[in-house]
Image (cartoon, coloured by chain):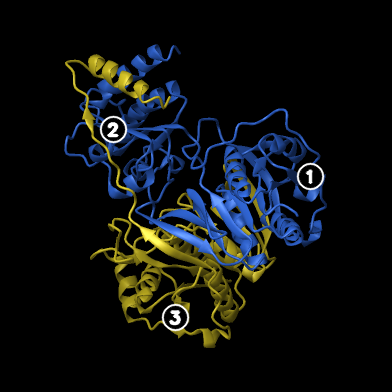
Chain colours: A yellow, B blue
Amino acid sequence: MKIVVCVKQVPDSAAKMMVEDGRITWGDAPLVINPWDEFAVEAALLQQESLGGDVIALSIGGESAKEALKHALAMGCGEAILVSDPALASSDSQGIAQVLAAAIRKIGDVNLTFFGKQAIDGDMGVTAAQTARSLGWPILSLVSVIQSLDPGAGKIRVGRATEEGRQVVDSRLPAVVSVGKDFAEPRYPSFMGIRKASRATIPTWSLGDLGVSAPASLVKWPEVNNPPSRQVVTELITGDTPQEIAEKLADKILAEKVL
Amino acid sequence: MSNQVWVYIDQFKGKAHPGSWEALGAGSSLAQKQGGGVTALVFGAGSPAVAEQAFQYGAGEVFYSDDASLADYRAEAYTALLAKLVRQGAPQVLLFPTTTRGRELAAMSAIDLETGVMPDVTALEVVEGRVLALRPVYAGKLFAKTACSADPQIITTRTRAFPSPQPDPGRSGTATRVEPALAEDAIATQVIEYTESGGGVSVSDAAVIVSGGRGVSNNPALTPPAGLDEKQAEIWRAQQGFKLVGDLAQVLGGAVGASRAAVDAGYIPYEHQVGQTGKVVSPDLYIACGISGAIQHQAGMRTSKVIVAINKDPEAPIFKMARFGVVGDLFAILPALTQALHTKLGK
């Protein structure tokens, strides 16, 4: 069985994001593997542990994205591949999906591709579905459990969350699966894993290597701004007893006319 | 001329997701600027009834399909039909509500229609005939104005960001039934089983959210039952705390939220988590109990209309964003607040 897990390098979730002179900055906050993608790596490794096979971590980005791939290697992925090309600098999600699809085709004979729910930078939440569509594979999104997986018969059964409840879905393989946080807690990289990852050589593929031209970038961000600052004057509610405080607070809340 | 704005109505078993009508309202506003109407699309079991409703909420034309192959939502089958209809009608704008299904269909349609998608937008404007969509990014730490240079410009509207139109029972029309685009054997997935979640209001849709953090486990007055180890005792304490949170939520008809710390500590299931790695919410009223307000939590609730914070630590960052704050013991204040609101709301 061959599994690909797609990961992205993003600014740490604790980073203070700012716009300075039209550019997005995050001060000295570190770049990390997208937290959602750690769940995807965990899901991929669990399948490998029960059925055998290879797990390959795949990312698109600059040289620094190798750090996200190294995290995936340290967690236990056997291989990592970086797709890097100056022509991808301003790609939109459709372009990224098409390039990921080309890389997955080049890897070849892939049964399953895992994604996290979304990346915490662009918050698009569309790359798994768009990559599936570009590959012509089914998408199983927000999967919380894989009930059965049979790469030989080309079948998978998953449980997934929807707005109204939970579904059990059967699908043919190959397929794309995106996982939620309820799949399984991601493991910490082991000491041995970190050592192995630090020594790993990560091949870099260009668009030329994939045999594709730079995709058109149709969606742009002509303007990025800091959020409108919240002009709040905090009113502290005090009183001698909890009941007195509660009475005052209840009146204040009702006066806001939001109930 | 056919309508230039189309809206996908996300529905489940004959009940439209409320975000669908918000998307339809946003679509009507865009269409009015060009002097046109809105076309709505409804697929799945129960879609004829929802199609009727779509006219009341402002659609001028409705296409629906309740074919057996579309009874359950399946991404491939729905995308194929959607893309086929959109190719025929060639609208400039295609809107979806940001539900799990809506976001997925929007994403896949953009590939089929060779255009772009702008998900989870909170405001729309038209500049020189093109849509400029406002999107919170980095969990709302920044706002990006986004544009797509191809048609249709595909957009998903964030739930509760756009007003829902008033339905007009006097409005009606004749919906057009359409045939599916894929034969059953061309669809790779099958829905085997479905379980409805056990009641309660979801944080994503709630107008009121009462949230608990690590602080809800710290009630010194409680003695856990004998035989629990330290961790079990902590969780037991937290569950007693979340009962108080839940009581207030119930009186207000709201949902129970939680901080990441509370979810990671095992106090409450993940579906309640508000924040950067949970749900991003914008209720009318957000009451944070025992939540210090880490930047990741703030990112998930900063667009709430009125924020109330109850915390024993006067230095907690949550107070900086709160309209009303109480520095004190939440285990005493919460039950009193529940009682006071219960009385004042006459419930």
Circle 1 sits in a helix, a strand or a loop, which is it?
Answer: loop
Instruction: Give the residue number, with chain letter if any, for mark 2.
Output: B323
Q: Is residue B274 left or right of residue A94?
A: left
Q: Are marks 2 and 1 on the same chain?
A: yes
The number of numbered badges drawn on the structure is 3
Instruction: Give the residue number, with chain letter if any, for mark 1.
Output: B66
Looking at the rendered structure, the kind of residue marked 3 is Ser
Task: Look at the image and tell me whether residue B105 can be seen.
Answer: no
Instruction: Tell me the mark number nearer the camera, choosing from 2 and 1.
Output: 2
Do the numbered discs 2 and 1 sit on residues whose CB atoms are within 8 Å?
no
Q: Are marks 2 and 3 on the same chain?
A: no
Circle 3 sits in a helix, a strand or a loop, which is it?
Answer: loop
Q: Is residue A238 left or right of residue B226?
A: left
Q: Residues within 10 Å of mark 2 (few under 14, many from 20)?
A: some
Q: Identify the image quadrant of the C terminus of chain B.
A: top left
Q: Quadrant of residue B129?
A: bottom right
Residue A153 vs residue B304, the one in the foreground: B304
Q: Tell me: residue B201, above or below residue B83.
A: above
Give the residue displayed 67% in from the left and 30% down from the top: B168
Instruction: Tell me the mark number nearer the camera, choosing from 2 and 3.
Output: 2
Q: Identify the image quadrant of the N terminus of chain B.
A: bottom right
Residue B282 vs residue B75, the one in the foreground: B282
Which chain letter matches label 3? A
Q: Position of residue A237 (x, y in %)?
A: 22, 24
Which chain letter matches label 2? B
